[in-house]
Amino acid sequence: MSNTQPTQPASENILEMRDIRVEFSAGKGRNRRKVVALNDVNLSVRRGTIHGLVGESGSGKSTLARVLTALERSFTGTVVFNGEELPVRRTKEQRRHIQMVFQDPYSSLDPRMTIRQSLAELLRVHRIVEPRDVGGRCLELMEQVQLPARALDSYPISMSGGQRQRVAIAKALALEPSLLVADEAVSALDVSVQAGIVNLLADLRDQLGLSVVFIAHDLAVVRNLCENVAVMYHGNIVEDGETESLFTEPKDQYTQTLLQSIPRIRY
Amino acid sequence: MTQTLLPPTAPATGLGGSKPPWRSRIRPWGRGSNIELLIGGVVFGAMVLAAVFAPILTPYDPTAQDLANALSGPTAAHPLGTDNLGRDTWSRLLFGARSDLGIAVLAVLFPFVLGTIVGALCGYFGGWFDTLIMRIADVVSAFPFFVLVITLVFVFGNGPMSIFLAISIVSWVSYARIVRAETLVVRDRDFIQSCETGGLGKARIVVRHVLPNTMTQAVVFAMSDVVSNIGVIVTLSYFGLGIVPPTPDWGQMISDGQQFLASGNYTLVLIPGAAVILASLSLTFLGDGIANALRAKR
């Protein structure tokens, strides 16, 4: 497989993943075998764009996200972020720049903390703003994710899935990251709520210049939102390119199969 | 057939008040009532108050002997009677509560703190530390509880300090196991992972995020542990291994009164026995009530 990407100036890419390889061992004793979760994957994300990542379950999308956010530490290859190669054990500051929004909004917030406590903790630990400005910054963040200010003093229990996902995004934004990794961030939400979160991500890209790695299996959403799309299959990126050309002229066999599997309504 | 559509508003429905959702109100009736907490709290609270204010509640010294009035039944001067040495039963009951309840509660605090911290560290970090601690825990729990406690008290000598030490050495294991198991579950939940991607320090994650979400079980267990500690202290004293004689204690009262059962003097055994039961029962209620109140709805 030769998908050599066009060499772009380094400054244009916020993220470059080179030859990322992750292997797990599964089974015990005699049945012990090696599973290749990521097979020397290369991925480049342009600054200020949303890069989609699609593929079936088990294709390695989430593992890629975990490598990006250093939740997965046993991998080979290099992650170059903003022209700087990130070590396996990252500093607080290095972690700050890459934030993640998780799939399940019902388990991604600490049930014993109000939204204000969650946000304020991050703001204080990273000294994002002066201590006396923490309250004001919390309000701004709520505004950014279009939640009312009174949500700040609620506990996650009293919020809906969509509201929680907005809070999760607010938590990520609190650290003023340059790259957001959204791992199936809209998959657990119903369609109308999904649309709200997707629009929010698009707004953040347009207004803050945020770069996003958007992992999803809903191809229609990806087509609307992303500038570029990478297709994953069995731990490989089989195709990577601009969204429209990939959707209209898929080159790889698997991509064609995937696109044909979209249910269509015939009139 | 007209349907009124709600005006399109910001996604703001369902944002409840700022009351922590796991804190149920202490009302004896109606929705959200917590009658166990109320009963347990009132009864146990009263016993603790009685122990604290023992010198005010009785005119007698619990160790003062009055052989002329030995084994008197309930009289105006001694409402619960006196024992074979003429000591006032009511006074001994109150001062006995001081030693029994005091040691029982203290002997929960230390293992609770130690076990909870160790359990959280084992669960969160795993590795050789976890293996080492859990093997030690296995060794401790391989012995029957009473055999180990009695042996330890025998080695350390009588008295409150050695009871406290013996119970601590044995019972931290339960707390460590409980919190470790809970931590293993919580560790892989997204909100802990999001703390890591958020760049929070490990110490902060364990103390601020893991422990508050794993301690509930340990707190509830602590209540029932006080109950079992009362049993242990009373049992040890009954065997003459516990609190040293002149100091009043329920176990000794039962053991001393036993010889007069045959002569029909039941109260000397029944009164301290009832005190043990009342203390245990109220703590069990309290534990249930706290469990109900702390259980986080997700």
Image (cartoon, helix red, strand yellow):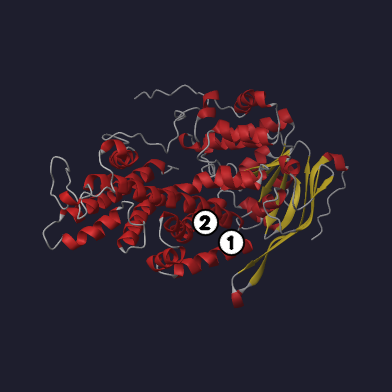
- Mark 1 and mark 2 in contact? Answer it, CB < 8 Å: yes
Where residue A155 appears, as percent x and y from the top left, is 49, 34
In the displayed image of the protein, which residue is found farthest to the left? B264
Residue at the disc numbered 2 = B180
Residue farthest to the bottom, as pictured: A30
Residue A10 horizontal/vertical position (percent): 87, 43
In the foreground, B164 or B137? B164
Residue A81 at x, y percent in the picture? 80, 44
Residue B67 versus residue B42 in the image, above or below: below
- Residue at disc 2, secondary structure: helix
Q: How many marks?
A: 2
Side of B31 where A240 appears, left or right: right
Horizontal placement of A186 versus B150: left or right? right
Relative horizontal placement of residue B228, taking residue B206 as reference (left or right): left
In the picture, which quadrant includes the N terminus of chain A? bottom right
Question: Can residue A146 be seen in the rendering of this structure?
Answer: yes
Mark 1 is on which residue type? Asp
| Residue A173 visible | no
Q: Amino acid at mark 2?
A: Arg
Q: CA distance from mark 1 to mark 2?
A: 9 Å
Instruction: Tell me the subunit letter for badge 2.
Output: B
Pointer 1 chain:
B
Q: Which residue is mark 1?
A: B130
- Residue at the far front: name it: B68
Figure quadrant of residue A212: top right
Nearer to us in this view, B198 or A49: B198
Residue drawn at (42%, 39%) of the image = B22
- Taking depth in this image into account, of A15 and B28 the one nearest to the observer is B28
Q: Secondary structure at mark 1?
A: helix
Left or right of residue B234: residue A255: right
- Which callout, 1 or 2, points at the residue further toward the start of the chain? 1
Q: Position of residue B82 (x, y in %)?
A: 19, 49
